[in-house]
Amino acid sequence: MNDRDLIHQAANLIQNAQMTVAFTGAGISTPSGIPDFRSDVSGLWNSADPMEVASLSGFRADPRAFYEWVRPLARTLLEAQPNPAHLALARLESLRLLTAVITQNIDMLHQRAGSRHVLEIHGHLREATCIHCYHGASAEELIKDWLDDDVLPQCPACGHAMKPNAILFGEQLPALVFNEARRAAKQCDVMLVAGSSLEVFPAADLPLLALARGARLIIVNHDPTFLDEQAAIVIRADLAEALPLLADEVSHVSGS
């Protein structure tokens, strides 16, 4: 069966669903120029032991090491723009055919594309929090000062290091957001998995939870995942091409 036929079938599933939820991973943002942190392209996994520099304990011990480690990708993350895959999900939401986007990404591109109900289970870069007094502040200017002038992000209240509100190793996922994501996974009858390798847990438990409650999975990803055999539809294609085609097909089926 070719991709067009699979996209048509996926569109019918979404059109006939009571509630569709998207679950996105790094693959949806690679067309925007953001490589998967774990890929050889990013270089992050090769330059240092992430369990040391990108863990909560490592950040507390040496925040500068974390910022030096993430420097190669920080400006890319701040300057990236949504690609057609992000825009397609926002369009599905505007058609009232997508209830929520659960994302593992911290790049905020879903919101920039126009998605309104986004559950960022691995945090984001909009804000930073002091590791000492928990003062919160906008992260963008702090990170730009670091990139441009080598000024370590410091708390304006107490002078300790500010940590972006992205989840590090050894840190709990944001409870309120993750609980809402779990509720969405339990309630949906279709989950669109887009650009996730489904290798990072507990995030990857969410499609399993959806399956256990009887939902149908649509997986759009370049590489195989451990849930392919349990999915209703698996599409191996470029997300920036496949998701806009899916949104077009859903729009056509619904007459919107």
Image (spheres, helix red, strand yellow):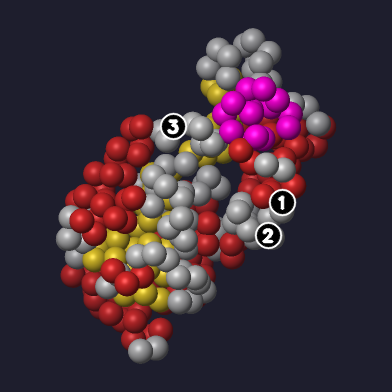
Q: How far apart are the two marked residues, 2 and 3, measured between alpha carbons?
A: 26 Å
Residue at image mark 2: 40
Q: Say above or below: 153 vs 11.
A: above
Q: Who's the residue at 42% across and 66% down the image?
A: 225
Q: Secondary structure at mark 1?
A: helix
Q: How far apart are the two marked residues, 1 and 2, measured between alpha carbons?
A: 7 Å
Q: Secondary structure at mark 3?
A: loop
* Residue 212 seen in render: yes
**Residues at circles 2 and 3 in contact by the CB criterion of under 8 Å:** no
Quarter of the figure with residue 229: bottom left
Q: Amino acid at mark 3?
A: Gln
**Neighbourhood count class around disc 3 (C-alpha, 10 Å): few under 14, some 14–19, many 20 upward:** few
**Neighbourhood count class around disc 1 (C-alpha, 10 Å): few under 14, some 14–19, many 20 upward:** few
Q: Amino acid at mark 1?
A: Asn
Q: Residue furthest bottom?
A: 1
**Residues at circles 3 and 1 in contact by the CB criterion of under 8 Å:** no
| Principal secondary structure, stretch drawn in magenta | helix
Q: Which quadrant would the C terminus be assigned to in this image?
A: bottom left
* Residue 19 seen in render: no
Is residue 16 found left or right of 233 in the rendered image?
Answer: left
- Residue 172 circle label: 3
Q: Sequence-wise, which precedes: disc 1 or disc 2?
A: 2
Q: How far apart are the two marked residues, 3 and 1, measured between alpha carbons?
A: 25 Å
Whether residue 193 appears in magenta in the rendering, the answer is: no
Q: Sequence-wise, which precedes: disc 2 or disc 3?
A: 2
Q: Position of residue 134 (x, y in %)?
A: 53, 17
Q: Which residues are magenta?
A: 52-65
Q: Which quadrant would the N terminus be assigned to in this image?
A: bottom left
**Of 63 and 8, the residue lying toward us:** 63
Q: Position of residue 122 (x, y in %)?
A: 47, 41
Residue at image mark 1: 46
